[in-house]
Image: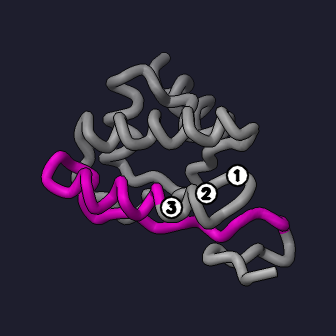
């Protein structure tokens, strides 16, 4: 069996997070899309993304995350965002997509809205 491009963590048995950034904007959408498509094609199971170093995030970044989530769901897997910068959190909240950040982050964002 060939080695996975995203090594498994011994503790969690989940893939190591694929880092993206520092920009997830229209100017960099094609390169980011290609990186994610390669990871989708070569990594079975859930896909973890590290967006902690993203400094610029626009609707193209949102579109990429939604398309990735849809592709994973079609094969029975899930998208896991392991880290998200303030730019990512703010944009996802603005678009009503805080749930993409996972239950703990979504709950924290909901608490900030009150």
Q: CA distance from mark 1 to mark 2?
A: 7 Å
- Measured as percent of width and height from the top left, residue 82 is found at 59, 56
The answer to whether 53 appears left or right of 3 in the picture is: left
The residue under label 3 is: 50
Any mark on residue 46, and which?
1
**SS of the residue at dot 2?**
strand
**SS of the residue at dot 1?**
loop
Asked whether residue 68 is drawn in magenta, I would say no
Q: How is the image coloured?
A: one colour
Residue numbers of the magenta segment = 12-37
Q: Are marks 2 and 3 in contact (CB under 8 Å)?
A: yes
Quarter placement of the N terminus: bottom right
Rendered view: 107 above or below 20? above
The answer to whether 81 appears left or right of 104 in the picture is: left
Q: Residue at x 56, y 50 (%)?
A: 81
Q: Nearer the viewer, mark 2 or mark 3?
A: 2
Rendered view: 65 above or below 34? above
Q: Residue at x 36, y 45 (%)?
A: 88
């Amino acid at each position: 069996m060939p080695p996975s491009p995203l090594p498994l963590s011994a503790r969690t048995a989940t893939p190591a997070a694929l880092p993206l950034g520092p920009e997830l904007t229209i100017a960099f959408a094609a390169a980011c899309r290609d990186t994610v498509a390669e990871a989708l094609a070569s990594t079975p199971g859930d896909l973890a993304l590290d967006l902690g170093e993203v400094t610029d995030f626009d609707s193209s970044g949102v579109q990429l995350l939604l398309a990735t989530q849809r592709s994973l769901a079609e094969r029975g897997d899930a998208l896991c965002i392991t880290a998200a910068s303030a730019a990512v959190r703010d944009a996802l909240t603005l678009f009503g997509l805080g749930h993409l950040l996972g239950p703990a982050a979504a709950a924290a964002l909901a608490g900030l809205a009150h």
